[in-house]
Amino acid sequence: MKYTKIFCIALAATLAVSCTEKKPQETAATATAETKKDDFNYIADMFADIKVLRYQVPGFDALSLKQKELLYYLYEAALSGRDIFYDQNFKHNLTIRRTLEAALNGYTGDKNAEDWKKLEEYAKRVFFANGIHHHYGNDKFIPACTPAFFATVVKGLDSKTLPLNNGETVDDFVARISPIMFDPKISPKKVDKSPNKDIVQASAVNFYEGVTQKEVETFYAAMEKKDDLEPIWYGLNSKVVKENGKLVEKTWKVGGMYGAAIEKMVFWLEKAVTVAETPVQKATLQKLVDYYKTGDLRKFDEYNMSWVKDTEASVDAVNGFIEVYDDALGKKGSFESVVSFRDMEATKRIAAIASQAQWFEDNSSIMPEHKKKNVVGITAKVITTVVESGASGTSTPIGINLPNADWIRSKYGSKSVNLGNIVDAYSSAAVGGMLEEFCFTPEEAARAKEHGTLAGKLHTDMHEVIGHASGIINPGIGSPKETLKNYASTLEEARADLVALYYITNQKLVDMGVMPTLEVGKAEFDSYIRNGLITQLTRIEPGKDIEEDHMRNRQLVAGWAYEKGKKDNVIEKKVKDGKTYFVINDYEKLRVLFGELLKEIQRIKSEGDFEGGKKLVETYGVKVDQALLKEVLERYKKLGDKPYKGFIQPRLVATKDASGKITDVKVEYPDNFLGQMLEYGKNYSFLPNYN
Ligand code: ZN
């Protein structure tokens, strides 16, 4: 087993209530599944600020043929929805992607020329981000080649390969598409949550068109019934446009918007129904099909209630319009799919935590009136991922907790998963030097090396299983989406992190057998403070502040603890040889501080205290010390890593007999990122260009 020293990053997205936790690992993996190859090459490509990795699917070969068949159908369903996320991100994304595909497939000029290399890098960035805006920072990125070069390339292609509108000439096409790609003023941000802006109009996402924030809010307020104990998540599966002066929804369903892709998904899901592992799973998949066919959000609720109960089967899938993080208003669900099967061995750890959920709730630092009397049905498992698409690919979550509807969660529970093979791939691919560079003492680095991987996994487990699941909202207050608005996600992530932090140095975890020593907890405290105050800054550009919810939450938590602990010197800022470090002097007092902040953020959520939440986030979570940022970026640059990572997906290949019956399914590991993107473009491009 080789040892790598790593860095820790937070990969990306989340939503109001539950989350898709995307977080990185700091130390080397120790997992040794039987089918895992040690000589596997984890790093496939590097460009811009991106490193593309690969992951293995240990245990796949040992599955039954029926399970493999089920995975294969769910895999096809996942990829069939791929176009949807491109279009949701920006209405010109599919056109631009198809133009780039045509260029990559058809360009006959010098592919070593600098301009071509720049265009190719742009294409990779578009594929990685599922569109022309940065997957994490949300800013539009611009091709480094000239518009003139781009025009020459496109005009040299076979026009039949280009996504031209009816009757459009290639010249007109270039004139139309070029400013969208090259003009920084056009649709500059995918999601813009700036206060004092019309966040609907300022965001480039394709969830609304020709309508204002006010109009949308009024439109949905009229649908939402106060005091509804089982509220429908209105707006989750539609685009809002204006027709004849009135707002209408274009629903994403068979026969509706995105129908061509959804029909393909339904085709594969109906096959999946026939090989479901259990009756509950069969019913669950059937409900998903019904929902896609009708677009009826009540059916989506029914699907979720059934999905939560589907805990016996090994194979599982997230598939739908799920996370609302890409909508500034938190209503519209981005398409995603994650197909997986259970990692039996690793599930024991997360299940142990879930089994003690009530103890954790009872012993939490939050006010008694905010505690759940009966923590219901939290199920947790470690999964082996088979494929990810939409909002989960290429940039992937490492933990998922669903469904998102509060009332389903409190009544029926939720499912929490940890993506074990993804986490291991991160660890295996990690670069050396981060710990040496950013830990103040060799002891801190040694602790991270010895305990960091487990610490990270436990943090994720607790964040998902007992973090998001904890606490109650006061009667009549309404959901955090409504009360805390654009601060809801950040505060919710902070709350879940704080539950994990509050307990990770607790002897209870040692007694439960999920960690060998309290040193694991200390390693997590070190890592959290180091990341929240220093290393996550490697993802921020000079002059910018923090936008992304998880990053805001981490700086909020670490920065608040630093500030409040100053009088007791709990966390000390040290500068040595021009390098800044934050060193924890008192782990016990830090735990108490985490508990206090948890209590306060729970109060904010329970009471719907918008002003209190806003103040916390704006004071501690947003602003970046630009001198420190400059220093950190210089230190990081020397290490030769990239701040963002994502994955090439494995490929499932089915063998069929003469009658078309599947006789075997094999997993392959492509190693060329562009190759996979072009393959997907050829095989899974089902939507028209909506412009
Ligand atoms: Zn979360």
Image (spheres, rainbow, N blue to C red):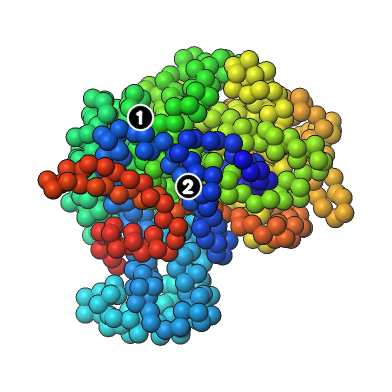
Residue type at mark 2 is Tyr
Quadrant location of the N terminus in the rendered image:
top right
Return the residue at label 1.
314
Return the residue at label 2.
55
Query: Left or right of 576: which side holds 279?
Result: left
Between marks 1 and 2, how big is the CA–CA gap?
20 Å
* Residue 210 x/y as whole percent: 34, 61
Residue at the (26%, 34%) spot, across then down: 66
Q: Is mark 2 within 8 Å of ligand 1?
A: no
* Residue 29 x/y as whole percent: 59, 39
Q: Pick whichever, 120 or 504, lies toward us.
A: 120
Query: Left or right of 104: which side holds 188?
Result: right
* Residue 584 x/y as whole percent: 79, 35
Q: Is residue 90 above or below residue 619?
A: below
Mark 1 Cα shell of 10 Å, populated few (<14), some (14-19), many (≥20): some
Query: Left or right of 576: which side holds 208?
Result: left
Q: Is residue 338 above or below residue 280?
A: below
Q: Is residue 587 above or below residue 103?
A: above
Q: Secondary structure at mark 1?
A: loop
Q: Secondary structure at mark 2?
A: loop
Quadrant location of the C terminus in the rendered image:
bottom left
Q: Pick whichever, 678 or 83, lies toward us.
A: 678
Mark 2 Cα shell of 10 Å, populated few (<14), some (14-19), many (≥20): many
Q: Is residue 365 visible?
A: no
